Image (cartoon, rainbow, N blue to C red):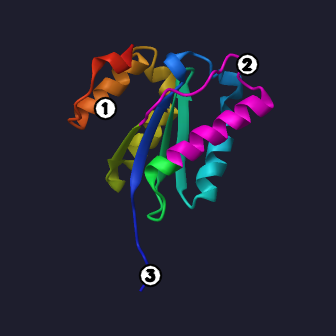
Amino acid sequence: MSTYHQILYQLVFSTKNRNPTLLKENRRDLYKCIYGILNNKSCFTHQIGGIEDHTHIIFELHPSIALSNLVKDIKLGATSFIKEKNIFPDFDGWQDGYGAFTYSIEAKENLISYVKNQEEHHKTQSSADELKQILEEFKIIYDEKYFI
C-alpha cells in the first residue's frame, strides 16, 4: 500500500520587527527561492505572496517533513539568498516564530486568491491586524506584545 496525504497549510512569517524591507521589485526572486526550498523538501507549493513586511505560503506539507524544520530551512535559505544576491539591502532577518494554519482542500482556491491579492488587501488592513484576525478565526490565544 502507498502513503496518501493532503495537509494544506498557510504559513505566515514576518521580517524582523515587521520592517518593510521586502521591496516589491525583488519579491518574485525571493518567492522563487522559497519555492525551490519547498520543492526540494517534497512539498507542493500552491502560492507564495506577501508585502514589504511579511510572507504567506500556501503549500502541502509532505508527511515525512517536520513543520518546524521546514520553516527553519525556509528562513535560513531565504536569508542566505537575500544576502548573497543583495536583493533587499535593508533586510536584517526574520521575526522569531511563525503562524501555520491547516485548511481543508475546499479552501485552497480562496487561499490562493487571498495570497495573490495581498497588496490590495493591505491597503485597508495592517499586517498585525491580519494575523490577529487569522488567530481569532482559529481560536488561538495570543499575546499582544508580539504585535508591536
Image vertical order of residue 41 relative to residue 9, above or below: below
Residue occupying the point 44% across, 81% down: 2
Distance from Cα at disc 1 to Cα at disc 3: 34 Å
Identity of the amino acid at label 1? Ile
Q: Nearer the viewer, mark 3 or mark 2?
A: 2
Judged from this view, the residue extending furthest toward the right is 85
136 with respect to 112 (left or right):
left
Residue occupying the point 68% across, 16% down: 90
Badge 3 crowding class, 10 Å Cα cut-off, few under 14, some 14 to 19, many 20 or more, is few
Residue 100 lies, in percent from the top left, at 39, 42
Which badge, 1 or 3, comes first in the chain's sequence?
3
Pick the residue in front: 94 or 112.
94
43 with respect to 146 (left or right):
right
> In this view of the protein, can residue 31 be seen by the observer?
no
Distance from Cα at disc 2 to Cα at disc 1: 30 Å
Residue highlighted by disc 2? 89
Residue highlighted by disc 1? 134
39 with respect to 114 (left or right):
right
Residue highlighted by disc 3? 2
The residue segment tinted magenta is: 70-98
Secondary structure, mark 3, is loop
Assess whether mark 2 and mark 3 are in contact (beta carbons under 8 angstroms): no
Badge 1 crowding class, 10 Å Cα cut-off, few under 14, some 14 to 19, many 20 or more, is few
Residue 12 lies, in percent from the top left, at 45, 35
Residue 138 covered by magenta stretch: no
Residue occupying the point 41% across, 73% down: 4
